[in-house]
Image (cartoon, coloured by chain):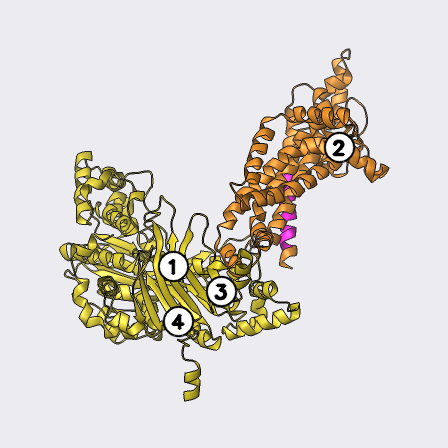
Amino acid sequence: MAFAVFAARRLASMIWVMLFVALFVFSLLYLAPGDAATVIAGEDTSPEDVERIRKGLGLDQPFHQQFLIWLGNILQGDFGISIFSNIPVLELIGQRLDPTISLTLTTIIFSTLVAVPFGVIAAWRSGSLIDRSLMLFSAICFAMPAFVLGYCLILLLSLQLDLFPVQGFVPISDGIGPFLLAITLPTLMLGTVYIVLIARITRATVMDVLNEDYIRTARSRGLSEREVLIRHALPNAAVPIVTVIGLGFALIIGGVVITETVFNIPGIGRLTVDAINKRDYPLIQGIIILTSAVYVIINTIIDILYVYIDPRIRL
Amino acid sequence: MGAAKSVATLPDTVNKALEVENLTVTLPPDAERRLAVDDVSFSVARNEILCLLGESGSGKSIIALAIMGLLPRPVVNVRSGRIGLNGQDLLALSPRRMRQMRGQQVSMVFQEPMTALNPLLPVGDQISEVLRTHTKLRKKERRDRVLTLMDDMQLPDCERLYAAYPHQLSGGQQQRVMIASALALEPALLIADEPTTALDVTTQARILSLIRKVCVDYNAAVLLITHDVGVAAEVGDRVAVLRYGRVVESGPTRSVLESPAQDYTRMLMASVPRFQPRTGNQPHHYRLLIEARDISKTYVGRSLSAKGRQVQALRDASLQVYEGEIVGLVGESGCGKSTLARIIANLEQSDHGEIRFRGEETKALIARDNRAFRKGLQIVFQDPYRSLNPRRSIGQSIVEGPLNMGVSSQEAWEGARAILEDVGIDARAVTRFPHEFSGGQRQRICIARALAMQPALLIADEIVSALDVSVQAQILNFLREIRDRSDLGVLFVTHDLRVAAEICSRIAVMRSGEIVEMQETQSLFESPQQDYTRSLLNAVPGKALLEGTAIELVDQTDRPASCAKAD
């Protein structure tokens, strides 16, 4: 019951954040240089025609009225129509959603599965070979631009060894085998930085936790080191780790542009770049609102997870 | 109790459960000394409690960890010796075999029950863990066994408590859970490392009697580590006094503590606050310095859910401090004593009531002349390790206040040197940094910092609680000296009645935000008016023994500087 109240409260605060985002996005367009009516009308139109178009678009209304109309449309699923392709924004985004969602999920799952055990073992045996190799690996990965890594992977694993396709995306509906084959290299490229990030945070927090009294208590009960780590250390280190994984989702949406370009994947990242290059404002708005919604939802999920992880965090 | 029973529960002194022989443990090369434990031997029988008594750094906890096989290797290592448990040499066991012994044959209870329990697991599961690791019991059987154990530890409402998390339990309950988990498999040896140090005095008394009881009920040998002579006197069958990693002397508790053979033990006993009010604590001035009248304070907890929890920290608390007297403010943790001190110091605001400093309402005084108020009232805090800025030399810390008050730099530094000499620290040390000093020296520096402002009132918030008894005795002596040669009034906040009895002319006893009783120290001890005060007095450990030895030792407490130079 208390949990339901807490979740409802969190959802309510989500709405506030999204409203704020909507206001911000709308002001962006409102304040943007250039006049949509002039753009739509084209070069050789009379001022009267431009004025008519402006009225037709509701652009002569005061700011708050324009905002409310715009917000109403969005709530009904009408994000407007792309200026350049003349296709509804929502439809355009929908077409590009699958590759990006797939890549984001495979990257997060893959990095978490590799990074957390790696970090835990590095913390447990700090100063050991495995710990020092993590540190070296992380220095290299942070220093190397992602696209360099991507091309190296293509060169080695696709061109030389012929293990994976060079480019492209296969939706999961076309079979799990081809899907995995196509998405492996992009995942490796995008995931490396997150592996390093998550592993280092895991290492640091688990190292702190291993100094706690209850770890000594667990050892004094004769538990094996594996149990000490999995049952006592890792759950207590979970809050920062989960935070970083959540942040990872947000960061990946930025990183996905380069990966999608390198591997020629038709995802949101490339759609964003195209939209910005062409100043396709309705499309940019739509993308910002949808990605912010994703951030906010992930943040809320993380907040709810905290309560689940740690009973001391009050509802 | 029948005669047969008492015979059955006598310590089995022939077949010792634990035998430590010539144990030597090395420290890393950069440590203060080479050996943490130097050629230590002792033994404990089943049904017997041996107290390892020593001040901080005596090596007592290292011995416990060595027995458990949990030394922080490779930094600290056993160099030689033998640790026999039921005839088996623990040091010769493989790590795997040693792990099987832990929890099963030898187990441990730690100082801070709050941090010794995993905050994310229900306490029942944490006790059950021992059974899961070492036995093949099924889930249901484990649960039943855990409930029986919890019941044995006199925990209330065990079914419900099983699923509770550590933070939902009181300190005493947490420690009972720890003891239950340690005794789950009826080990031959139970090590309790300062098991009651973090607890309130009444809780301490109950936990000590529980340890006493389970030692017999579970037929265990108990090694109890403590810095507190009172605790050793209360529960120890025998005691071994440790210093610098060596056993100074050992034997039956009474004979060691009542007629110590060694100088160190004598010094230790002399430092222990007697359980009797000392004479000569009466104030020598009668001008009212500060008066708190009907102070109330309620905290409203903020949580994500709308209704905040309300905690009434103070209810109409009133007290006065006169010039030249030390007033004790005594109570258990959470009773509101620190809140009252902070409100008097204007570090927090009260909801109701007023504070008058030399007759003037403090709020008005502060509005008129904030500096005069700040200068007139100084605070010293509990933890000397955290109350000095590590990046400033102690001189810089001391002159900061006077400089802010407009004293010239030269004057302030001269004052700093003089005040350091006053507190027994070489004036040439002004340029040194806090980490170069011991805990006791740091606390004296903190006091010097406060006194450099020449305050009228000093608020001392648990200032000796983190210190060893010998150091504690020096600080108390020093406070007495300042009081005797000045008009300084001191509000001495402490949880320890023994300490308050040493220096206070009057004592206010607090409970749940209320001052339940305020009396002259002498009459408070002789005829406490409140049940709560009586229960506090009765809970003091080792009372009988300390009262018995009070007279012969009083003189030595006043030994001047000879032991003041020791720390």
Q: Chain of mark 3?
A: B
Q: Residue at x 55, y 65 (%)?
A: B127
Q: Which chain is yellow?
A: B
* Towards the viewer: B451 or B95: B95
Q: Residue beneath label 2, please?
A: A79
Question: Circle 4: is it few (<14), some (14-19), or many (20+) Cα within 10 Å?
Answer: many
State left or right for residue A254 relative to residue A96: left
Q: Chain of mark 4?
A: B
Dot 1: element:
strand
Where is residue B457? Give x, y as percent: 23, 53
Q: Residue beneath label 4, please?
A: B49
Q: Colour of chain A?
A: orange
Residue B512 visible within the image? no
Residue A19 colored magenta?
yes
Q: Report, in whole angstroms, how far the alpha carbon at label 3 lies from the one at label 2.
A: 66 Å
Q: Report, in whole angstroms, how far the alpha carbon at label 4 lies from the one at label 2.
A: 78 Å
Above-or-below relation of B512 to A251: below
What span is colored magenta in the figure? Answer: A5-20
Residue B429 visible within the image? yes
Residue B175 colored magenta?
no
Q: Residue beneath label 3, please?
A: B107
Question: Circle 3: is it few (<14), some (14-19), or many (20+) Cα within 10 Å?
Answer: many
